C-alpha cells in the first residue's frame, strides 16, 4: 500500500538532520514513502544502509514526500582509502515526482558531500541514473569490488550502477578499480 500525503499544504520544506535528530515516527514515514517508490523492492538492508548519517527530507506539511541520505563509507581507489559520502534511500513520493524535488534533495546531498568528503558515490537505479548524470554524477568505467570476509571480491554485476561525484582537488581515475567496504545486503 502506497502512503498518501495527507496534509497537502502546498508549501514544501527542506530539512537536513542526522539520524539521531529524526524522530522514530518521521523515519518510519520516510522509510514507507521510499519503499513505495521502489514497488516494495526496497529491503530492510536498503533502509539500514540509509541510517547513521545525514538525512535530507522534503515535507509537504508534516508528511515526507522526498528523502535522501548520505552516510560515510570507505572506498579504496588507487591505493588510497577515500572518505566517501555514499548516497542511500533516495525517493520521491509518486504524486510529487517530476516537480523538482529530486533536484532539491540532490542539491543538499551534493553540498554535504563537497563540504565533508573526498568523494561522493551511489548505486543508481535505471530510473534514477538520468537525474544523477544530469547533475554531474559520473558512471564508473573501471572495475568494482568489495572488501569481504574472504578478502577483496570483484563485483562486476554492480559496476554498471556505480556513479561517483568527484570532489575538487581529489585525484580520480574512473577507469581504475573502486573497492567498497563490506556490509550486509547489497554492497553497492
Image: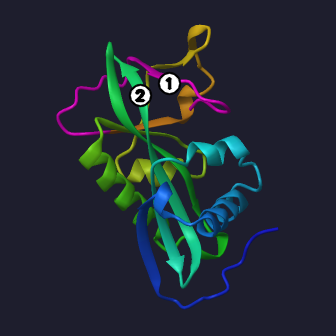
Mark 1 secondary-structure assignment? loop
The furthest residue to the left: 169
Q: Nearer the viewer, residue 146 or 17?
A: 17
Picture coordinates of residue 81, whole percent (x, y): 34, 21
- What is the magenta segment's predominant secondary structure? loop
Q: Is residue 34 above or below residue 86?
A: below
Picture coordinates of residue 109, whole percent (x, y): 38, 55
Q: Is residue 117 magenta?
A: no
Q: Is residue 177 magenta?
A: yes
Q: Nearer the viewer, residue 68 or 25?
A: 25
Q: Is residue 50 above or below residue 35?
A: above
Q: Is residue 89 left or right of residue 40?
A: left
Q: Is residue 174 above or below residue 168?
A: above
Q: Earlier in the sequence, mark 2 or mark 1?
A: 2
Residue 97 visible in image: no
- Image quadrant in which the N terminus is located: bottom right
Magenta region? 166-188
Picture coordinates of residue 10, whole percent (x, y): 52, 89
| Separation of marks 2 and 1 at Cα, in angstroms | 6 Å
The residue positioned 33% from the left and 36% from the top of the image is 119
Q: Badge 1 local density, few (<14 within 10 Å), some, or many (20+)?
A: some
The residue positioned 68% from the left and 41% from the top of the image is 45
Mark 2 secondary-structure assignment? strand
Q: Nearer the viewer, residue 20 or 147?
A: 20
The residue positioned 60% from the left and 62% from the top of the image is 27
Amino acid at each position: 500500500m502506497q502512503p498518501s500525503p495527507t496534509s497537502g499544504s502546498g508549501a514544501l520544506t527542506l530539512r537536513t538532520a542526522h539520524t539521531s535528530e529524526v524522530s522514530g515516527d518521521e523515519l518510519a514515514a520516510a522509510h514507507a514513502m521510499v519503499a513505495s517508490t521502489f514497488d516494495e523492492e526496497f529491503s530492510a538492508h536498503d533502509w539500514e544502509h540509509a541510517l547513521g548519517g545525514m538525512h535530507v527530507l522534503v515535507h509537504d506539511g508534516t508528511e515526507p514526500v522526498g528523502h535522501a541520505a548520505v552516510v560515510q563509507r570507505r572506498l579504496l581507489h588507487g591505493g588510497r582509502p577515500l572518505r566517501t559520502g555514499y548516497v542511500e534511500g533516495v525517493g520521491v513520493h509518486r504524486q510529487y515526482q517530476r516537480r523538482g524535488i529530486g533536484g532539491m534533495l540532490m542539491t543538499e546531498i551534493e553540498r554535504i558531500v563537497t563540504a565533508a568528503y573526498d568523494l561522493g558515490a551511489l548505486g543508481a537505479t535505471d530510473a534514477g541514473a538520468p537525474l544523477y548524470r544530469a547533475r554531474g554524477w559520473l558512471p564508473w568505467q573501471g572495475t568494482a569490488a568489495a572488501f569481504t570476509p574472504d578478502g577483496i571480491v570483484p563485483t562486476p554485476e554492480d559496476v554498471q550502477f556505480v556513479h561517483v561525484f568527484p570532489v575538487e582537488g581529489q585525484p580520480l581515475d574512473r577507469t581504475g578499480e573502486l573497492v567498497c567496504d563490506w556490509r550486509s545486503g547489497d554492497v553497492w
